[in-house]
Amino acid sequence: MSCRNTSELHILGSSDQLVLQPLWDQLRARDALTQSPLFAVIFSISTYVGFCLPFVVLDVLCPWVPALRRYKIHPDFSPTARQMLPCLGQTLYQHAVFVLPLTLLSWACGPAPWPREAPELLQLARHVLGCLLLFDAEFFAWHVLHHKVPWLYRTFHKMHHRNSASFALATQYMSAWELFSLGFFDAVNVTLLQCHPLTVLVFHVLNIWLSVEDHSGYDFPWSTHRLVPFGWYGGVTHHDLHHSQFNCNFAPYFTHWDRILGTLRSK
């Protein structure tokens, strides 16, 4: 019976792995791109800008399409080109000056070979959730510290709060130290959990999307915080309150840390 159960679990794991294998094979077949020292930067910028663009289009259309205003947290606010372009420029500048050299250094030290097998679907889901929970805790601690210590706030975090009403392209409008901190947390977490390279890519895509959505200024019926039950996920309304009130809602995604430490606000 024990051997039979082991065999059944092996078959289940193999079938679970087969779900992601075609996708993983496609990525491995494009190793000229994925193994390039430029891949991490191209992937990060293209994913970020791709997620921001729909909200930029909505911001442009909003003054002319009144129906869109019902979904805006600040119906009378639409970011101007003079607000959006410096944010985009800051993102491109930091990726060119800081992210690219670090990526090249990592690549020069020897890129890790990608495995032939894809991860199991359940393993990928567990690791992505684990990375999100770890990042949420790490950034919560970093965020509280950089609000409570005036010198840290003025020097490193104030830049991100220059736009009191958030919009998508303001997501990465931050100091180099803040960007480095976020990247460090990401790198530590995927290493700590020994994530498969496909899991790392999925986590980065999801992490970028959730960050952009949190800063988008739009609260749709399908927004993430409306899909996660029991108020466990804060979302765009949660983070917008942080930008307007400063002393609450420090966690980027989930609500448990703010709830435990008494910094959770709903209005």
Image (spheres, rainbow, N blue to C red):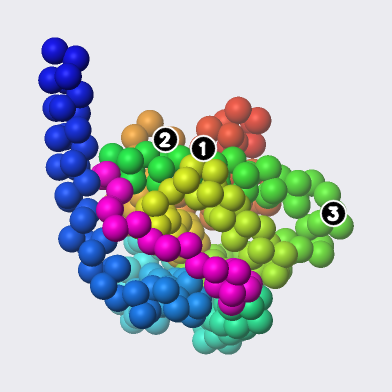
**Quarter-wise, where is residue 67 in the image?**
bottom left
Checking the image for residue 231, the label placed there is: 2
> Which image quarter holds the C terminus?
top right
**Mark 3 and mark 1 residues within 8 Å of each other at the beta carbon:** no
Let me know if residue 91 is in the magenta part. Answer: no
Whether residue 207 appears in this view of the structure is yes
Q: Which span is picked out in magenta?
A: 102-121
Label 3, secondary structure: give it.
Answer: helix
The residue at which mark 3 appears reads as 150
The residue at which mark 1 appears reads as 255
**Mark 3 and mark 2 residues within 8 Å of each other at the beta carbon:** no
Does residue 64 sit above or below 157 in this rendering? Answer: below
The residue at the point 48 percent across, 62 percent down is 112
- Name the spot of residue 88 as percent of width and height, x first: 54, 81
**Quarter-wise, where is residue 55 in the image?**
bottom left
Amino acid type at mark 3: Pro
| Residue 180 horizontal side relative to residue 228, left or right | right
Whether residue 163 appears in this view of the structure is no
Q: CA distance from mark 1 to mark 2?
A: 7 Å
Label 2, secondary structure: give it.
Answer: helix
Q: CA distance from mark 3 to mark 2?
A: 31 Å
- Name the spot of residue 247 as percent of width and height, x first: 69, 46
Amino acid type at mark 2: Gly
